[in-house]
Amino acid sequence: MRTLFLVIALPLLVALPSCRKKQPVPPPASVHVPGTPHTDEVLTAFRNAGLTPDGFAAVKPIPAHATYCEHGKVNAIDTTLCEYRDDQALDKAVQEIKAGWARIDAHTGVVVRAKRTLLAVVDRERREPSGKTINQMLNVFSGL
């Protein structure tokens, strides 16, 4: 009787795992680009300079030309940081950003690079007419 139970139960136990739904495999995490300032390093530098980065999160989906991007606000000003694997992709991104700003008639927009990391800042809501925060961000970013 015991042998009969094993003969019936063993194939069922082997088959059960294959009947379970397979868990979806998460996509690979975005990888920072070596040899260029990483977004988290830039945000740390901003904090150390007395700026207040807020709400930064990875951009999903990642813009077509970038390898990794984060978007948030620094002292209430829209800020995007992206890392690129090559100069061509970075140059295309700069053109697209500037074209996008022209379409929305952005009040103040600045896009600069440090190696293959791009900082795009736009003051859509005209929160800072003096440009003091943007200037401070540029100074910190250019020092990386």
Image: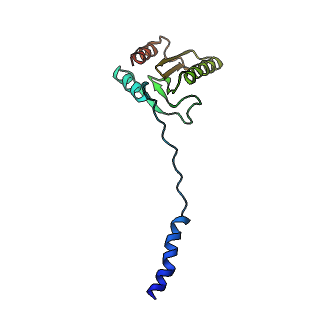
Percent across and percent down for residue 66 are: 54, 29
Q: Nearer the viewer, residue 119 or 67?
A: 67
Q: How is the image coloured?
A: rainbow
Percent across and percent down for residue 92 are: 60, 22
- 47 left or right, relative to 125: left
Spot the residue most to the top. Answer: 130
Residue drawn at x 59%, y 30% as measured from the top left:
64
Residue 139 in which image quadrant: top left
Q: Nearer the viewer, residue 127 or 91?
A: 91
Spot the residue most to the left. Answer: 48
Residue drawn at x 54%, y 63% as measured from the top left:
20
The answer to whether 113 is drawn above or below residue 68 in the figure is above
Residue 95 in which image quadrant: top right
Residue 53 in which image quadrant: top left
- 89 left or right, relative to 46: right
Q: Quadrant of the C terminus?
A: top left
Residue drawn at x 46%, y 89% as measured from the top left:
1
Percent across and percent down for residue 29 are: 48, 40
The answer to whether 33 is drawn above or below residue 143 in the figure is below
- 84 left or right, relative to 52: right
**Numbered-mark total:** 0
Spot the residue most to the bottom. Answer: 1
Percent across and percent down for residue 70 are: 49, 30
Q: Nearer the viewer, residue 114 or 122?
A: 114
